Amino acid sequence: MKIDLHVHSSLSDGSDSLEKVLDRAADNGVETLSFVDHDMTETYTRALPYAEQLGIALIPGIEISAYDFKRDRKVHVLGYNYDLDALHISELCQPLLERRHAHSLWQIEQIRSAGFDVDVYRIQSRLEPGQSIYKQHIMADITSAHYDSHEYKALYRKLFKGQGPASGDIRYIDVHDVIEAVKLDCGQVVIAHPGQLNSYELIEEIAGQLDGVEQHHPDHDAEDIDRVARLCTKYRLFTTGGSDFHGDFGDSVNVGIDKHSLSVYPFD
């Protein structure tokens, strides 16, 4: 039996449509899935009719781009099973989406000025009206190289890292405000891939406000999996897992993980 509680679609920074992701999940035997598109809650209602056709149980989800200001580092927060109107989450995330889009427009202009063939109208023509532009969309307009390739990674670093013309980042949401919003919308709060962003100290600090921690993730090794298990046992939290699937805009992974690899499964 397979689940996947961490999947992205083309509504945010994934390359594949909702239908294509769900078809892939069904082909791989996934029975329960959650789209956690970044900083938006609309994916669930749009995906639900087709998920029901395929017999896949869909869980409302979101991945919110937060910040741990005490330690000066990013932290990603997964919210699950929130009220579908999600008033508090949407109020918190909408300004973030607007900041991201404005920053992407600035990045496009900087990259164009640096001599690259990139065009904002060409990018927007591939997206839905009003959709926020992500770095993955910019990269897809510049190169056909796959995310996993040396060519892609070298170009990405050249443009967006260090002294690159489009380096820099937006202001993210305080992690405590994120937790409050998800709770106000009656959702469950999970810290995403703590091994990737080194969120372990934060988890220890705010465990009483959490419901779970993502244990199984492509960036987690055996040490991370064990560390999350011990933390969740200590603080009586549940564990989750997922592929962090982004299609061609991410690492080469398949949708779905073994449900029985989780020590606790909260969505039965």
Image (tube, rainbow, N blue to C red):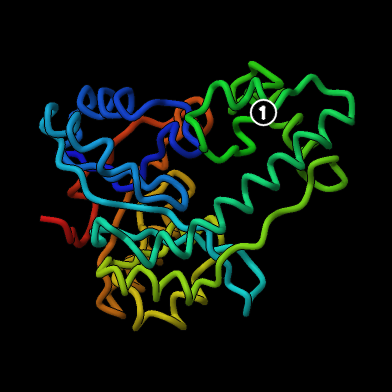
Report whether 131 appears left or right of 241.
right
Quadrant assignment for the N terminus: top left
Quadrant assignment for the C terminus: bottom left
- The residue shown at (18%, 49%) is 260
Looking at the image, which residue sits at the far front? 129
- Towards the viewer: 76 or 130: 130
Quarter occupied by residue 21: top left
Pinpoint residue 140: horizontal percent, then vertical percent.
63, 23
Report whether 196 appears left or right of 42.
right
Give the residue pinned by disc 1: 139
Quarter occupied by residue 244: top left
Looking at the image, which residue sits at the far top? 144
Q: Residues within 10 Å of mark 1 (few under 14, many from 20)?
A: many
Can you say whether 203 is above or below 85 in the image? below
Pinpoint residue 102: horizontal percent, then vertical percent.
68, 47
Pinpoint residue 202: horizontal percent, then vertical percent.
50, 76
- The residue shown at (43%, 58%) is 192
- Towards the viewer: 135 or 227: 135
- Towards the viewer: 32 or 229: 32
Report whether 89 appears left or right of 267.
right
Helix, strand or loop at label 1? It is helix
Q: Amino acid at mark 1?
A: Met
